[in-house]
Image: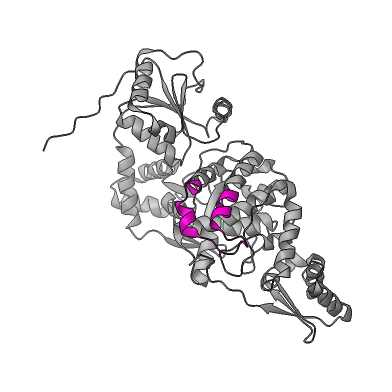
Amino acid sequence: MEQEEPVIQQELAGRITLYSMTGCLHCHHAKDRLSNMGLPFFEVNVVKNPEIHQQIVHLTGRLTVPQIYFNNIHVGGNDDFLKLSQEELDKLIDLVKNEPVPPDAPPIPAIVEVEVRKEEPEGKVDEYADLIMDFKESGMIGSNWICLKTYHNTFTGKKLVNWLVDNKNVDKSTAIELGKDLTNRKFLNPLAVKEFEDSNALYRLVEHDSAASLTLKSETQYTSSASRHSAIMKDLIVKLFSEHITPDGKIVDYKSMGANPVFDEYCQHATHLQLLDIGSLSRNEKLALFINVYNTLVIHGNIKKGPPKNAWQRYRFFSSISYEIGGNIFSLNDIQHGVLRGNRKSPPQIMKPFANDDPRLKASLDDAEPRIHFALNFGAASSPPIKAYSAEDIDKQLNISARDFLDSADGCQVDVAKKEVGLSIIFKRYKVDFGGTDEKVLKWVSDHLSDSTKKKALTELLDQGKARIIYLPFDWSTNAKD
């Protein structure tokens, strides 16, 4: 069999510059293509270099990565790179081969932290990948309990060190350094500590986190315009919702949405959530961003993982499906209880979602917002309708969502003859958010109903002081289109 000719590394007088970000699949494809063509390039990680990222956004008008330059010629993203004709590509290659970098070329760090990429074997990375594969098969990964909370797919630093010593023929100090290197290279994610330790601190393989987290971990935080990014994502969400969700917001065509190129664009922007400075958001901006992210993350999880089918799967789904936002992982439960309910315990838990030293606390609302319960959709038939929310009109939109849900049979039913008020199980699970007593819950419901016969009937029962609450069944079957 004839052997394939090796790619010859070309010498360039100029420079190919690629602006990228950790965890970006499009960046990975662009880098692979350049490497396969034998073209060296400078890679500038925009997360590590936020000031340069701002300059590139100004130059290109684009928030997304990668952005590729041949000297001072802006090619665009990976899709633009792929669309170049052979003639256009040859001209660009000739340019950087023969022309030095001009003064108006895009910026790179003053202290060159960029990576000069040449054709190189994966070597150490492949070796680490093999090591991780062996560790996965070792039986060391399992469930660990800390403070009455179970952490699945985890292991202690001590277990990894001991396994390396026993199975990889290294001494303890080398094993510890290897653990640190695996953590730095994003093979491991620490759950509580910042660096790898030979201790009982817990770690999880990144692949196990990425199976739950639908964005990848960034190395540092970047102060981006969170409100601007939220608005961009909202526009994409509105387009997806309008095309793949029934007008009443109740039924989702997950299959067709997953195949829509707009969903791929949304996923790219979801990856950029890791860059946001969520501490800069106002209350209204937090509400709109996190409600929209929650509802779309449920959809994203259903598309990638399929809908949960029983109580245990629902627990796993809502506690593990997550995005990285502002440099920290937020699961669906974290968003609902930690952020939108002002860091209140969920009904089955005895502890608040975020501890006092948890950096995610900066995202929490000052107090629980009860109306979010009629804006969050769980992917179930009895869930409130799916809508997209904007910071400018968030209070008006939440009032409408509460009113519409209570006006429906799923939300509230009043039987004057039996002196019964049937309420969604939501009011039982989150009673504290609506006042904490039956009387306060019914008053809250009355205040948020539209002027209708239902409201008049409830007012009559409240005036008599004889209303009794019963809770309506909740249909957890999927809201997927048949």
Q: Look at the picture and state if 54 lies above or below 306.
A: above
State yes or no: residue 358 in magenta: no
Q: Look at the picture and state if 148 lies above or below 237.
A: below
Q: Position of residue 275 (x, y in %)?
A: 57, 40
The N terminus sits in image quarter: top left
How many numbered dots are placed on residues in this image? Answer: 0
Q: Main secondary structure of the magenta part?
A: helix
Q: Look at the picture and state if 275 lies above or below 360.
A: above
Q: Position of residue 40 (x, y in %)?
A: 35, 25
In the drawing, does residue 432 fall left or right of residue 443? left
Farthest residue, direction left: 1
In the image shown, does 38 or 178 lie closer to the viewer? 38
In the image shown, does 143 or 89 lie closer to the viewer? 89
In the drawing, does residue 428 fall left or right of residue 416? left
Q: Position of residue 452 (x, y in %)?
A: 80, 71
Farthest residue, direction bottom: 418
Whether residue 369 is visible to the viewer of this picture, yes or no, is no
Farthest residue, direction right: 463
Region in magenta? 237-264
In the image shown, does 166 or 388 lie closer to the viewer? 388
Q: Position of residue 261 (x, y in %)?
A: 47, 46
In the drawing, does residue 45 fall left or right of residue 128? right
In the image shown, does 372 or 315 lie closer to the viewer? 372
Which residue shows up at 41% across the image and 20% down it?
Answer: 15
State how the image is colored: one colour
Q: Quadrant of residue 406?
A: bottom right
Whether residue 442 is visible to the viewer of this picture, yes or no, is yes
Q: Look at the picture and state if 314 lies above or below 193.
A: below
In the drawing, does residue 101 fall left or right of residue 353? left
